[in-house]
Image (tube, rainbow, N blue to C red):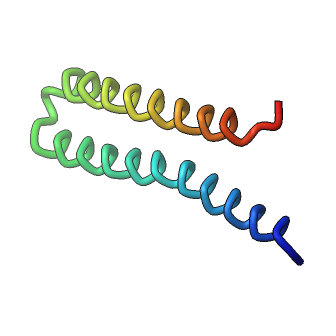
């Protein structure tokens, strides 16, 4: 167990971080959505549309980070 295992652990930890950040962000956005819908049930479509934009931004940023992560660490 030399340098290869250390590099593998770093890779796993970075990939885990890049995966868990969007999950936590989605959970926070979901809690805010439920709270807004509880306060304003008649404004359901507008509340859902505002959350949709936030989710799209979050997913594009997280996907870009994961792609950049693989591009930097790829051999080719």
Decide: is 42 above or below 18.
above
User: In which quadrant is the N terminus drawn?
Assistant: bottom right
> In the orientation shown, which residue stands out farthest toward the right?
1
Decide: is 50 above or below 18.
above
At x 17% / y 41%, what residue is drawn?
A: 36
Image side of residue 39 versus residue 31, left or right: left
Image side of residue 55 versus residue 76, left or right: left
Residue 32, percent from left and from top: 23, 46
Residue 48, percent from left and from top: 28, 28
Which is more toward the observer, 21 or 69?
69
Which is more toward the observer, 7 or 42?
7
At x 24% / y 22%, what residue is drawn?
A: 45
Image side of residue 27 versus residue 48, left or right: right
Which is more toward the observer, 34 or 4?
4
Residue 6, percent from left and from top: 76, 70
At x 40% / y 45%, what residue is drawn?
A: 26
> In the orientation shown, which residue stands out farthest toward the bottom?
1
User: In which quadrant is the C terminus drawn?
Assistant: top right
At x 32% / y 51%, what residue is drawn?
A: 28
Which is more toward the observer, 28 or 2?
2
């Amino acid at each position: 167990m030399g340098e290869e295992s250390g590099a593998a652990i770093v890779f796993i930890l970075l990939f885990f971080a890049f995966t868990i950040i969007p999950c936590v962000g989605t959970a926070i956005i979901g809690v805010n959505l439920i709270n807004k819908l509880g306060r304003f049930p008649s404004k359901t479509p507008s509340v859902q549309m505002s959350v949709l934009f936030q989710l799209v931004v979050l997913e594009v940023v997280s996907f870009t980070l994961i792609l950049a992560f693989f591009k930097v660490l790829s051999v080719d």
